Amino acid sequence: MARYVTLIRFTDQGARAIRKTTARALAFKKAAEKAGIAVEAQLWTAGACDGVLILSGDEKKVLRCLTQLASLGNVRTETMQAFDAKELKTIIG
C-alpha cells in the first residue's frame, strides 16, 4: 500500500463553515475507509496549512477520494507520496 501526506487549506467557503470542520472530517474518514483507504491521521494545523491527512491505500482510490473531497469546495489539497525508512532504502538501494 502506498502512503500519502496531504496538506489541506480551507477555501473561503470552508473557513466560513469552520465550526463544521470536525463533522466534515469524520464524514471524510468514513467515506475513505468505506473505499478501502486507511486514514492514519487527520490533524488541524496552525500556519501556512490548515490541516494534514495521512492516508494509505491504492493510489487510484486515494486520489479519487481526495478529488471527491476537494470537489465539495471546502478545502484545497496538495498531496505527496511518502515513504518510511524501509521503503526508501528499497527505492534507493
Image (tube, rainbow, N blue to C red):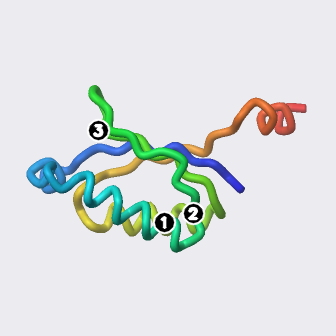
Q: Separation of disc 3 and disc 1 at Cα?
A: 20 Å
Q: Which three-letter amino acid code belongs to the residue tagged 3?
A: Asp
Q: Separation of disc 2 and disc 3 at Cα?
A: 22 Å
Q: Nearer the viewer, mark 2 or mark 3?
A: 2
Label 2: state its secondary structure: loop
Tag 1 residue? 32
Q: Please give left or right for residue 38 compared with residue 11 in the image.
A: right
Numbered mark located on residue 50 in the image: 3
Q: Separation of disc 1 and disc 2 at Cα?
A: 5 Å
From what the image shows, is residue 37 above or below residue 17?
below
- Is there CB contact under 8 Å for labels 1 and 2? yes
Q: Which three-letter amino acid code belongs to the residue tagged 1?
A: Ala
Q: Which three-letter amino acid code belongs to the residue tagged 2?
A: Ile
From what the image shows, is residue 93 above or below residue 6?
above
Q: Please give left or right for residue 5 compared with residue 46 in the image.
A: right
Numbered mark located on residue 37 in the image: 2
